[in-house]
Amino acid sequence: MARRVLVWVAVVVGLVAWLTPTVTPAQAADPVRIMVVGDSITHGSSGDWTWRYRLARHLTATGAEVDFVGGHSGLYDLNSKGFGSMAYLDAGFDTHHQARWGRTLLEETTTIRSEVATHAADVVLLLMGSNDVGLSGIDGEESEYRLRTFVANARAARAGVDVVIGKINVPTNVDSDAARAAFAGFNAAVDRVASDLSTPESQLVVADTTAGYDPASDNFDTVHPNARGEYKIARAFGDALHDSYGLGGTFPAIPAVPIGPQQAPQAQVAASDSTLHVYWTESLGATGYVVRARDVTAGEVDFTVRARVAGRNARFPAVNGHRYDVQVQAAKWFAEGASSAVVAATPAAGALPPAAPAQPTGVTVSNRSGEVGLSWTAVPQATHYYVEYREAGSGAAFARWPVTSKTSAATIRGLVNGARYDVRVQAYQGHGEGPFSGTLTAAPTGPTPAAPTVTATPGDERATLSWPAVTHATGYYVWMRGPGETVFTKLALPVFGTRWIPGLTPGATYDFMVQAYNGLIAGGRSTPVSVTPSGIAPAAPVLTVTALPQGARLTWTTPEHANNYRVYLRHVTAGQSSWSVTTLPVWGPPWEASGLVAGHTYEFKVQALNGQVEGGTSAVVAATIEGA
């Protein structure tokens, strides 16, 4: 990809430019770092492909060199109501993202600065606002304020970051004109913000995710996209990236795609007196199941619905001596997916219903690095077992480990060393689930990683921190001490890799340490390293001074690379020969001096700076102050 040559300028919010690090991009040959920011529509839930998957696969297929970045990689588990599920329908893509189920744009405005800085995002894809409008009922004015704040805070981390903003669709349960107008107001605000704030250095582009999108047929519930809707959202962002940045190719025509859960349940049926008992295995991503049957003996050809349930068993009345065909279909809310094979049974007078399996006993836990092993006493006639877990003390619902065990042992993998988990076991006997075992506490553990050896290399408005990989480290935290600070601050988000490139204020000196972590197990911190990034000295501004009553108004041109200024003043009439200078940075024109003496002459000059790199100073301009 031929990337634009961008000037990445540190934009400072607040009085002290160096308190929050900004990040500059990697060299042009590096992949474009894309951070997808959103709520549940982007986060996705267990059993989804997600629109992130469709976009990533499209960009890869068209030869785009991209790297998806962010602090998350998993899905929301609809069953356990927990985060971090990796139960994608296909996890064969770069799953990193910065989306969170239930999150609002208002909440995201407070964190986007650190997220862009930590992950060195070149492009942010934003699809948020449904919760702000749908839950809070904000109007178009408030929508615009939140969008502008988001953009300003993203640019405060990287002045040249590009932002692609998606529009939001109206949920199918919105039934008032006022509510529909609020969604339209948000989308109108998206257009205004992109038009007003886009610059050559930091482009704002609109992805019209409402074009061709029909919530009634493209959602699996009132608001979340099904597989077809995921394609349409990905197409909107893919075309925006291609049309505005030349990234990837034109998104192809959307193929016919099956919706609903695609893992077919495995059904069994047992018969008792005048009743059929149907049970089945769990389907990935299913929130419910549809049980259909036909009475073959009575000559029925079509299947009819006998039950809709959220669990994995059902029963319904049947005529003794009649054969029934039964089929179970997995569903994710309104989206019905794959169906089981047809199973058959014939109820008979006096037949007894099947019994549930007993409670597992003798459960033991073996704590290992990144995983927990469990074993228990085999339950007679159990066909397999479910293992569930949750963060200890969280009060959250248990999450079911997706791999069932056919023996009396199982391993839960992908756990965080140093964390504590509640675990339990349940037996399954085809026709039903038995009671859970008692709950035990597990605590995976591992070695404490050593301190990294860090090298800091200065660059233009940035620095590169690098270190060899530390054995047993799963991630790293960066500690920073900026100019004028006496203590180190641990940055909020971890680094997954052995290099971090913060954008910094040119000419200022920073100290860094890197600490290795094995899950939650903290290792040693590196020896502090110091670095002073360089920067291009800006040219001298051209100053204009307008006398005011007891004051003066200064305006000046803004040279390239300048991001703050010093204003100098001296009282000529009072015989001053030395200059007074502003003690705090001036971020740009205009600037006004007040409390000056009427009828007296003052001289002014302005110096441009790039961070702390001093640039040129304007010519001296005199002004005689007006009376009150």
Image (cartoon, helix red, strand yellow):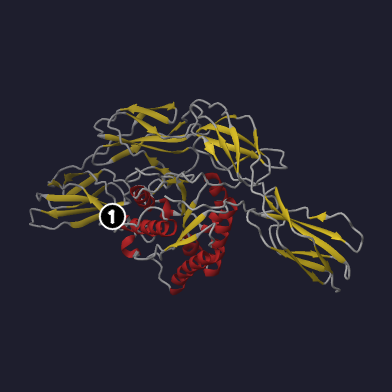
Q: How many marks?
A: 1
Residue 383 seen from this side: yes
The image shows residue 415 at horizontal and vertical percentages of 44, 34
- Above or below, 605 against 98 in this view is below
Residue 137 seen from this side: no
Q: Quadrant of residue 211?
A: bottom left
Residue sitting nearer the eye, 24 or 516: 24
Report the side of 427 relative to 181 (left or right): left
Report the side of 476 relative to 264 (left or right): right
Residue at 35%, 45% in the rendered image: 88
Report the side of 11 relative to 567 (left or right): left
- Above or below, 391 against 239 in this view is above
Residue occupied by mark 1: 259
Residue type for callout 1: Ile
Report the side of 41 relative to 17 (left or right): left
- Above or below, 254 against 346 in this view is below
Residue at 41%, 66% in the rendered image: 170
The image shows residue 354 at horizontal and vertical percentages of 21, 40
The image shows residue 431 at horizontal and vertical percentages of 23, 41
Task: Identify the image quadrant of the C terminus.
Answer: bottom right
Q: Quadrant of residue 389?
A: top left
Mark 1 neighbour density, 10 Å: few (under 14) some (14–19) many (20 or more): many
- Above or below, 380 against 550 in this view is above
The image shows residue 545 at horizontal and vertical percentages of 77, 67
Residue closest to the far right = 575
For the residue labelled by badge 1, is the local secondary structure a helix, a strand or a loop? Answer: loop
Residue sitting nearer the eye, 167 or 239: 239
